[in-house]
Amino acid sequence: MTFLDMTRQRFSVRKFSPDPVEPERLDRILEAARNAPTAHNNQPQRIFVMQSPEAIAIVDACTRGRFGAPVVLILCYDAKESWKRKDGYDSGEVDLGIVGTHIMFEAVEQGLGTCWVAMFNPEEVRRRLELADSIIPVAVMPVGHPAPDAEPYLFHDQRRLLADTVIRK
Ligand SMILES: Cc1cc2nc3c(=O)[nH]c(=O)nc-3n(C[C@H](O)[C@H](O)[C@H](O)COP(=O)(O)O)c2cc1C
């Protein structure tokens, strides 16, 4: 499968099978996250792998966006480590966007589904994971085998025309 095919095939999975994620598949996903480029190669990502019953209970207290997945990654960055430009711009969120994208596409290659979930309670995440002040949670990402009847949501195919989003000069 070409990368372009993968970009067509991926969709946000919002219904997961309870089947466990094989450890070697999860390892490959985490390795893909490790390979992501980050500003100045600072690698500020901190990824919580939530899998135990206790960890899943924490996720469920923080978001409705687990969708039955047996594994949830909480993607954070350490603001003490993310690269800052002189004008104060902090690359942490962008770094995590790229890390998360690597995760999503390695998951496709592994036959797994993911969903980027921003709808979570950051204060609950902070409190329940006892995060240091510098650790910023960016996304919650359920990972698992899609349920047999998992389907792309309505919006999935509604991509704008290239002419709407690309400005050629
Ligand atoms: C930054 C970001 C935040 C998102 N937050 C949520 C969310 O909280 N809940 C959810 O179900 N989907 C969320 N999504 C998934 C988007 O709704 C989805 O990617 C978009 O509708 C396109 O559909 P597709 O991923 O199936 O192609 C988020 C996606 C991104 C990139």
Image (cartoon, rainbow, N blue to C red):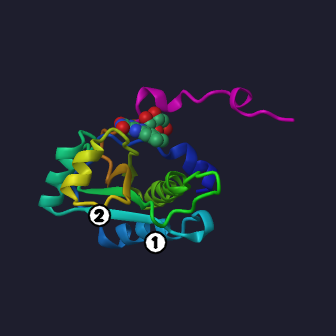
Q: Amino acid at mark 2?
A: Val
- As for residue 166 lying within the magenta part, the answer is yes
Dot 1 or dot 2, earlier in sequence = 1
Q: Please say if the residues under marks 1 and 2 sit with CB atoms less than 8 Å apart.
A: no
Q: Secondary structure at mark 1?
A: helix
| Quadrant containing the N terminus in the rendered view | bottom right
Q: Residue at x 36, y 63 (%)?
A: 47
Give percent across and percent down for residue 86. 65, 57
Determine which residue is flagged by label 1.
31
Give percent across and percent down for residue 11. 45, 42
Mark 1: C-beta under 8 Å from nearest atom of ligand 1: no
Give percent across and percent down for residue 125. 25, 51
Q: How far apart are the alpha carbons under marks 1 and 2? A: 13 Å
Q: Residue at x 48, y 61 (%)?
A: 106
- As for residue 56 lying within the magenta part, the answer is no
For label 1, the crowd category at 10 Å Cα-Cα, with few meaning under 14, some 14 to 19 and many 20 or more, is some
Q: Amino acid at mark 1?
A: Glu
Give percent across and percent down for residue 119. 33, 38
- Can see residue 69? no
Span shown in magenta: 152-169
Q: Secondary structure at mark 2?
A: strand
Q: Nearer the viewer, residue 4 or 81?
A: 81
Determine which residue is flagged by label 2.
49
Residue 110's place in the image compared with 124, above or below, is below
Q: Nearer the viewer, residue 81 or 149?
A: 81
| Quadrant containing the C terminus in the rendered view | top right
